[in-house]
Amino acid sequence: MQMKDDPSQFLLVEVYQTKEDQAKHRLADHFQKWRVAVQDLIAEPYTNLTYDNIFLDESVLKK
C-alpha cells in the first residue's frame, strides 16, 4: 500500500496461516529475487510487526 500523505512511503502486508508457511516463502526463489531487486529502493531497514491470524469459519463467509 502507498501512503496518501507521503507517496514515497509504502506498507507491505503479508499474511500466512502458519509460521512454517512464512519460512517457506522466505526461502522461495521469487522472494530471494525480490529482495535483491528492491535492496536499493529501501531507504531504511524494514521492520516486522507480528499479529495473530484470525480466520473465520468458511460457513460464516458464505452468509
Image (tube, rainbow, N blue to C red):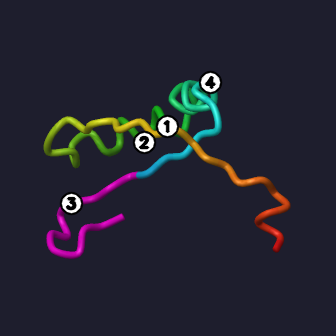
Q: Which residue is mark 1?
A: 31
Q: CA distance from mark 2 to mark 4?
A: 20 Å
Q: Earlier in the sequence, mark 2 or mark 3?
A: 3
Q: Given the image, on which type of amino acid does mark 4 rest?
A: Glu
Q: Are the two marked residues, 3 and 1, in contact with CB atoms closer than 8 angstroms?
A: no
Depth check: 11 or 39 in front?
11
Mark-to-mark CA distance, 4 and 3: 29 Å
Magenta region, main secondary structure: loop
Q: Quadrant of the C terminus?
A: bottom right
Mark 3 element type: loop
The amino acid type, in three-letter code, at marker 2 is Trp
Q: Image quadrant for the N terminus?
A: bottom left
Residue under label 2, please give it.
34
Residue visible at 78% across and 53% down in the picture = 57
| Residue 37 or residue 24, whichever sits in front | 24
The part of the image, by quadrant, that contains residue 43 is top left
Whether the residues at callouts 1 and 2 have beta carbons within 8 Å, the answer is yes
Q: Earlier in the sequence, mark 3 or mark 1?
A: 3
Span of residues in magenta:
1-12
Question: Which type of secondary structure does the marked residue at label 4 adopt?
Answer: helix
Judged left or right of residue 27, residue 51 is left
CA distance for labels 2 and 3: 18 Å
Q: Please, what secondary structure does the residue beneath circle 1 have?
A: helix
Which numbered dot is residue 9? Answer: 3
What's the distance in space between the residues labelled 3 and 1, CA to CA?
Answer: 21 Å
Given the image, on which type of amino acid does mark 3 rest?
Gln
Mark 1, other Cα within 10 Å: few <14 / some 14–19 / many ≥20 = few
Residue 61 in magenta stretch: no
